């Protein structure tokens, strides 16, 4: 049986090194993608929490206003309760929870 020339071992070593480097590169790419997805999810969760907090505070405020209005005379009750800020706070959490098309 004939022995392989030294150049064949060098070529095989270079190919093996390229395969190993490619594997590490692929693993690094997958891990960085997963990290970025996790960051986007955390940002989404933080934004949703903030909007829900604003919504709950608007509901608490509205409840306090309602309790105050119940104690007023009918003539004074003609006050605008639903401010644009409240309506904006009410719709924002719905946008966060609806799936994208």
Image (tube, rainbow, N blue to C red):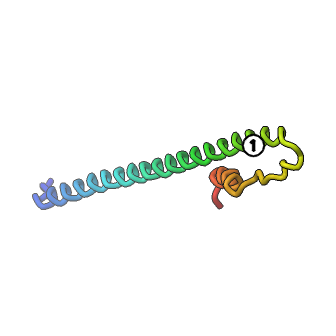
98 relative to 68 in the view: left or right: left
Quadrant in which the C terminus is drawn: bottom right
Element under disc 1: helix
Name the residue at 34% across, 51% down. 28
Residue 55 x %, y %: 66, 46
The residue where tag 1 is placed is 65
Q: Can the viewer see residue 33 in this picture? A: yes
Camera-nearest residue between 96 and 75: 75
Residue 24 x %, y %: 30, 51
Q: Residues within 10 Å of mark 1 (few under 14, many from 20)?
A: few
Camera-nearest residue between 46 and 37: 46
Q: Can the viewer see residue 98 in this picture? A: no
Residue 6 x %, y %: 10, 58
Relative to 8, residue 90 above or below: above
95 relative to 6 in the view: left or right: right
Name the residue at 47% across, 47% down. 38
Camera-nearest residue between 27 and 54: 54
92 relative to 17 in the view: left or right: right
Residue 8 x %, y %: 16, 59
């Amino acid at each position: 049986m004939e022995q392989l020339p030294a150049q064949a071992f060098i070529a095989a070593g270079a190919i093996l090194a390229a395969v190993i480097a490619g594997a590490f590169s692929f693993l690094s790419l997958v891990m960085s993608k997963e990290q970025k997805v996790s960051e986007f999810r955390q940002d989404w969760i933080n934004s949703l929490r903030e909007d829900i907090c604003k919504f709950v505070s608007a509901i608490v405020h509205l409840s306090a206003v309602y309790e105050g209005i119940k104690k007023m005379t009918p003539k004074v009750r003609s006050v605008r309760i639903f401010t644009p800020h409240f309506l904006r706070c009410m719709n924002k959490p719905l946008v966060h929870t609806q799936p994208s098309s």
